[in-house]
Amino acid sequence: MKYWWQQAIVYQIYPRSFQDTNADGIGDLIGITQRLDYVKWLGATAIWISPIYPSPMADFGYDVSDYTDIHPLFGTLGDMDVLIAAAHERGLKVILDFVPSHTSNQHPWFLESRASRENARRDWYIWRDPAPGGGPPNNWLSHFGGDSAWEWDEQTGQYYLHLFLAEQPDLNWRNPEVQHEMLNAMRFWLDRGVDGFRVDVSYKVMKDTEFRDNPRAANWRPGMDPFLRLELKYSENMPETHQFNRWLRAVADEYSDRVLIGEIYLPIVDLVKHYGRQDEFHLPFNFHLILTEWNAPAVRAIVEEYEEALPEGAWPNWVLGNHDQHRFATRVGAKQARLGMMLLLTLRGTPTIYYGDEIGMQDVEIPLDKIQDPAELNAPGLGLGRDPERTPMQWDSSPNAGFCPPDVEPWLPLAENYEQVNVARQKEEPDSMLSFTHSLIALRQQSSALIEGNYRTVGDDEHLLSYMRESDDERALIVLNFGAVPRTWTLPAEIGESELSLSTHIKERSTVIDGKLTIGGHEGVLFRQKLA
Ligand code: GLC
Ligand code: CA
């Protein structure tokens, strides 16, 4: 294996919710540093931290007002230096979030840009005259509510573009000065020792030169996200996105051993083009386990499609959850949570684990008066809010779960069941989700078949997904029962006599008799075999 990120297990930390150390109910950098030993113990090898930059927090840090500093809520540049050093001491890599598509409307660049049409920074953002008959320049919609993506500016008599909130004006990356400043912001962090970036909505950065109208979406119905009324034909994945990817990659390549991960929600055929010729993203995030129906045939089909589509030299990756998606254990049901973790950690490629998924954290219902996320506030009741999956990490059974002091209100409510579902408790229970995840990671990290072996589907059962991973000296067979009832399945001849190495469950664990496996409902099992 050539690069660290091919062998990595990435652990995503949502900084507001990981660990508070100064009693304001919001997680901070010192908190992350304090919990690095846990990440290390779990067996993850890299952390990706969602944005920690100065921000008015209209979109909880994804509205950046300074790309080269730390929000005081999270700490200081000094705290970040300590975090990076502490992570590196433990052999952990640090990946930051880079948000190139838009800034905050409070960023000094935007304040200048909107000051007058003649301002030197006017062209740093995307300003347009009204359409010929009046109104916005085109029909594009913005995320989080589905209103026009154009905001009228009374003072200068033009509209500016915002694909997300009006508080998140889009940068004009066709302006060379914007390119220069933004790429330098990357260098600022790379110089400080950061090991790479997850690049926010990378595929939306380059806009259509002609700003053509988007077509209506044929299958949109009331009750769906109003933003999806239109297809995104001209407002994402434009051909120039690949040029943008190459700019970023060239900067990463000025340094040794850094990684770029693109946040890209696209069909597989389009997604894999973001590897370029090894000159774009190292890892274009693959979200298809989130987007695909949760059953054996559907997951098998998507894994095969992805494996086949990967270009020469491209390294795969998989994701089950993040800060924008309902918790995995809620989407597929708590009983399938371990199975999902086993899938994530045994497919070929780099897995990313969302904090708390290793203990089976679930969505938390947020009372109306505690809702924070604009995605919910602007389109209430459609289930689009992201607060439920962003609640504080459940560390132990003490009040506030060890996230913040007992007498402080956390920024989002804790799960009601935190006294049962928490790290401290699950560490003690051999049959917990955490103990399982811990053992699975340990097994993966010393298995050449799992780290670098090839992938081959075995069988086409309706309820069982089974596949072989094979390296020069080892073979691993994984069988996952997506159904609720036990099944019997004939093991492939070459595996017949091998030992069952790991099951998702200690109790009611499966049996093998005469080459036939009887696997429990919701169970996943793994067999390993040394090859001579
Ligand atoms: C990405 C982030 C999301 C954010 C959006 C706008 O999708 O993951 O949290 O709201 O970009 O920056
Ligand atoms: Ca704090």
Image (tube, rainbow, N blue to C red):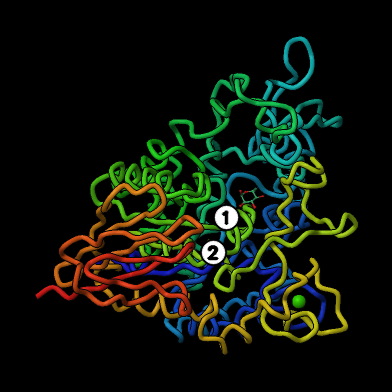
SS for dot 2 = helix
Expressed as whole percent of the image width and height from the top left, the position of residue 511 reads 34, 73
The numbered mark, 1 or 2, whose residue comes first in the sequence reads 1
Which residue, given by chain and number where applicable, does mark 1 sit on?
332
From the viewer's perspective, is residue 373 above or below residue 168?
A: below
Q: Nearer the viewer, residue 158 or 386?
A: 386
Q: Are marks 1 and 2 in contact (CB under 8 Å)?
A: yes
Which residue, given by chain and number where applicable, does mark 2 sit on?
337
Q: Nearer the viewer, residue 336 or 117?
A: 336
Q: Amino acid at mark 1?
A: Val
From the viewer's perspective, is residue 81 above or below residue 351?
A: below
Q: Is any atom of residue 120 visible in this view?
A: no
Q: Is any atom of residue 118 visible in this view?
A: yes
Outermost residue on the top side: it is: 133
Outermost residue on the bottom side: it is: 428
Mark 1–mark 2 Cα distance, whole angstroms, equals 7 Å
- At x 48% / y 57%, what residue is drawn? 319
Expressed as whole percent of the image width and height from the top left, the position of residue 83 reads 57, 80
Q: Quadrant of the N terminus?
A: bottom left
> Is 399 situated left or right of 493 in this image?
right
The numbered mark at residue 171 is none
User: In which quadrant of the rendered view does residue 272 lie?
Assistant: top left
Give the class, few, some or many, for how many residues have Cα within 10 Å of label 1's Cα (few <14, many ≥20).
some
Q: Nearer the viewer, residue 472 or 295?
A: 295
> Is 116 situated left or right of 5 in this image?
right
Expressed as whole percent of the image width and height from the top left, the position of residue 164 reads 69, 41
- At x 54% / y 75%, what residue is drawn? 433
